[in-house]
């Protein structure tokens, strides 16, 4: 299933990098808050940690090494995937992880720019790499609830 998962990973990596480039070079030059709707802003943030800023004091090289190891494990899993849903989900996760690794290497942290909120409560800002990671994880969770196809033993 690498023939499906790897192109999805590359596509999602490209989407992530293109949106970050657009935000950094055009939209947030200079940085500011741009209200889009009554529940969504474009902002500019730099996350040196992982999800929700956890481990922000960790050395960037450690986080990069862990992420690269995880991507390699995802690619191995992708190669062993038995269906398209799994391969697609793993591709989204891998593409997002690679996008965030590139950010850490280039900028010392991950560029976040999507800010959703209700009233005064704001969800932590995130980016398209994070969207791919969460959607991929959601697809894997969904798959765990789907019935497994039983194959009949071959009669020889």
Image (cartoon, rainbow, N blue to C red):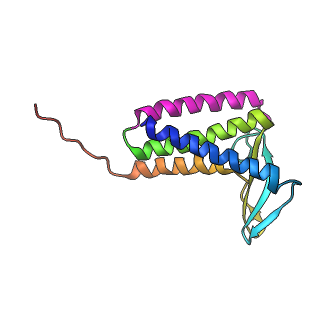
Residue 122 in the image: state x and y as whole percent.
Answer: 75, 61
Query: Between 149 and 3, which is closer to the camera in this rendering?
Result: 3
Left or right of 94, for residue 104: right
Say which quadrant the N terminus sits in: top left
Q: Name above or below for residue 117 compared with residue 139.
A: below
Does residue 112 appear anywhere in the picture? no
Query: Between 135 and 148, which is closer to the camera in this rendering?
Result: 135
Query: Between 34 and 65, which is closer to the camera in this rendering?
Result: 34
Residue 15 in the image: state x and y as whole percent.
Answer: 63, 48
The outermost residue toward the bottom is 38
The outermost residue toward the left is 156
Residue 110 in the image: state x and y as whole percent.
Answer: 75, 42
Say which quadrant the C terminus sits in: top left
Q: Is residue 104 magenta?
A: no
Q: Residue at x 62, y 39 (%)?
A: 97
Q: Residue at x 81, y 64 (%)?
A: 34
Q: Is residue 61 magenta?
A: yes
The outermost residue toward the right is 30
Q: Main secondary structure of the magenta part?
A: helix
Q: Name above or below for residue 120 compared with residue 124.
A: below
Q: Which residues are magenta?
A: 57-81
Quadrant in the rendering for residue 11: top right
Q: Residue at x 69, y 44 (%)?
A: 17
Residue 68 in the image: state x and y as whole percent.
Answer: 62, 29
Does residue 39 appear anywhere in the picture? yes
Left or right of 155, for residue 148: right
């Amino acid at each position: 299933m690498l023939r499906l998962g790897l192109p999805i990973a590359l596509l999602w990596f490209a989407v992530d990098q293109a949106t970050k480039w657009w935000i950094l070079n055009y939209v947030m030059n200079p940085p500011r808050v741009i209200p889009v709707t009554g529940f969504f802003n474009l902002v500019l943030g730099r996350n040196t940690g992982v999800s929700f800023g956890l481990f922000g004091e960790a050395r960037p090289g450690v986080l990069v090494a862990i992420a690269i190891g995880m991507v390699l494990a995802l690619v191995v899993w992708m190669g062993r995937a038995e269906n398209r849903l799994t391969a697609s989900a793993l591709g989204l996760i891998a593409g997002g992880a690679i996008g965030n690794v590139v950010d850490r290497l280039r900028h010392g942290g991950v560029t976040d720019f999507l800010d959703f909120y209700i009233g005064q409560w704001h969800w932590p800002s995130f980016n398209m790499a994070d969207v791919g990671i969460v959607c991929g994880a959601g697809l894997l969770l969904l798959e765990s609830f789907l019935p497994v196809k039983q194959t009949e033993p071959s009669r020889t």
